[in-house]
Amino acid sequence: MIDPRRTPERSMRRWPISVAVALALALQLFLPRQASIGPAWLMPVAQALLLLPLVLSDPVRLRREDTTWRRASLCSALGVLFVNALDLAHLIIAIATGGKVSAREMIVAAVVIEVTNIVANTAIFWEIDRGGPFARNPEHPHPPEHPDLLFPQMSDVNDTSFLTCFTDYLFTAFTLATAFSPTDTMPVSPRSKMLFMLGGTVSVLSVTLVAARAVNLF
């Protein structure tokens, strides 16, 4: 049974995504130097400059479909995900080569990388699933043929009547980062499977290699 509270207006709210991405960018300022690619302020400022026009164009709820803005938003989220993976690789190399990384710095780095991974995947899932928030509206003149993610509320892969919102994608990204695999929501498109692979890899490495190493130093 579809939740009657899931209206097209709710599914197109931008502010939860904007707040989540802003939080992820702010967290980059706390990333230890050993895990940061370049100055700590460089990536947050660069991503904020790209995020600002998107938020100002539709600060609370998406009111119009604009392919250019949607691509810019997707590129911003992909950029955060990619740089986050590079930060993790940089930290692992520092640890493997005997760099001076304290237990506190490694724990902080693991938390920042993990939270950023969750937020970036949430934003990407929200943008790509079934063609984006506008295309997911049942009243859209050209609804997508197939979804990228199969939620439990959807009876089969061809059922597009379920209206998703920010919380659904946040929960999917969170369970991916904590369980290292799909739980109740399954990736069905090649691109969503690739995102699951990348997100799961970042989470596994940040938890098993970084956090575990930090605990051993106490």
Image (cartoon, grey):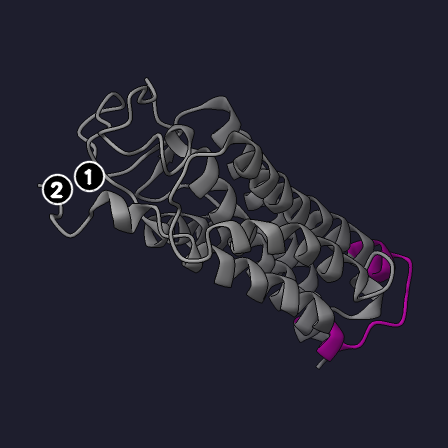
Residue 22 can be seen, yes or no? yes
Tell me the residue that label 1 is attached to: 153
Residue 99 is a magenta residue = yes
On screen, residue 123 versus residue 35, left or right, reads left
Tell me the SS state at disc 1.
Answer: loop
- Of helix, strand and loop, which mostly describes the magenta segment? helix
Q: Quadrant of residue 26?
A: bottom right
Q: Which amino acid does label 2 sit on?
A: Ile
Q: Distance between the residues labelled 2 and 1?
A: 7 Å
> Which of the labelled discs sits on residue 2, or is there none?
2
- Determine the residue positioned at 44% across, 51% down: 179
Dots 2, 1 in contact, CB < 8 A: yes
> How far across and down, in percent of the image, does residue 142 sit?
32, 19
Tell me the SS state at disc 2.
Answer: loop
- Determine the residue positioned at 15% across, 52% down: 5
Question: Quick one: which residue is furthest to the left in this view?
Answer: 1
Position of the N terminus, as image quadrant, is top left
Q: Give the range drawn in magenta.
A: 92-107
Of the two numbered discs 2 and 1 on the same chain, state the one appearing first in sequence: 2
- Determine the residue positioned at 35% across, 27% down: 147
> How far across and down, in percent of the image, does residue 97 sit?
91, 58
Residue density around tag 1, few if under 14, some if 14–19, many if 20 or more, within 10 Å: some
> How far across and down, in percent of the image, does residue 216 sit?
70, 73
In the displayed structure, 34 sits above or below 165; it is: below
Position of the C terminus, as image quadrant, is bottom right
Q: Quadrant of residue 87?
A: bottom right
Q: Which amino acid does label 1 sit on?
A: Gln
Residue 72 is a magenta residue = no
Q: Nearer the viewer, residue 177 or 30?
A: 30
Kindly report which numbered mark, 2 or 1, lies closer to the viewer in this rendering. Answer: 2
On screen, residue 8 versus residue 205, left or right, reads left
Q: Which of 191 and 98 is in front in this view?
A: 191
